[in-house]
Amino acid sequence: MHSHHNTVEIIKLSEKQKQQLIRLKTKTGIDNWNVLCRWALCMSLAEDSVPPMEDIPSDSNVEMSWKVFAGEYADVYLAVLRQAYEKQKAHLDDVLFSEFFKLHLNRGISFISNSKL
């Protein structure tokens, strides 16, 4: 167990998220999973509302480390996420930090999938 609970180690996408991102790659010409995922996360965190509780499976073969996901701005992403977590965790029943991240990423991917790009 890590002493730092507020970290994310590995990001593993669901099959549904993978399919949504494949369509986005085609639409946007952006070829990197991590760039699209960062964009999605930021869109969700920009909303004041809490993301819906959902059980998101990690059933795709797309996986990346936090380092790959967050790149050179890893500290910034982590700080923003921790701040959002402190603010929103009261509205989310016992949700772990890594789950909180997954909920926001999931909502963000839905947002960009549904937006007119």
Image (tube, grey):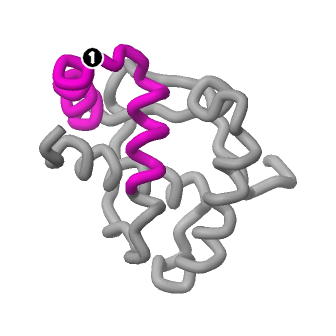
Q: Going 60% across and 79% down the picture, which residue do you hit?
A: 87
Vertical side of 22 occupied by 84: above or below: below
Three-letter amino acid code at the position of disc 1: Gly
Magenta segment: 16-43
Q: Going 43% across and 75% down the picture, which residue do you hit?
A: 48
Which residue is at the front of the view, 29 or 1?
Answer: 29
Residue 72: say if magenta.
Answer: no
Which residue is at the front of the view, 60 or 33?
Answer: 33
Q: Is residue 56 left or right of residue 67?
A: left
Q: Position of residue 80 (x, y in %)?
A: 64, 59
Q: Is residue 97 left or right of residue 7?
A: left
**Quadrant housing residue 15:** top left
Q: Position of residue 89 (x, y in %)?
A: 56, 77
Determine the residue located farthest toward the bottom in the rendered image.
90
Residue 41: say if magenta.
Answer: yes
- The kind of secondary structure the magenta stretch mainly shows is helix
Determine the residue located farthest toward the front in the rendered image.
117
Q: Going 57% across and 30% down the picture, which residue do you hit?
A: 69
User: Badge 1, how many Cα within 10 Å: few under 14, some, many 20+?
Assistant: few
Vertical side of 98 occupied by 22: above or below: above
Count the numbered circles shown: 1
Quadrant where the C terminus sits is: top left
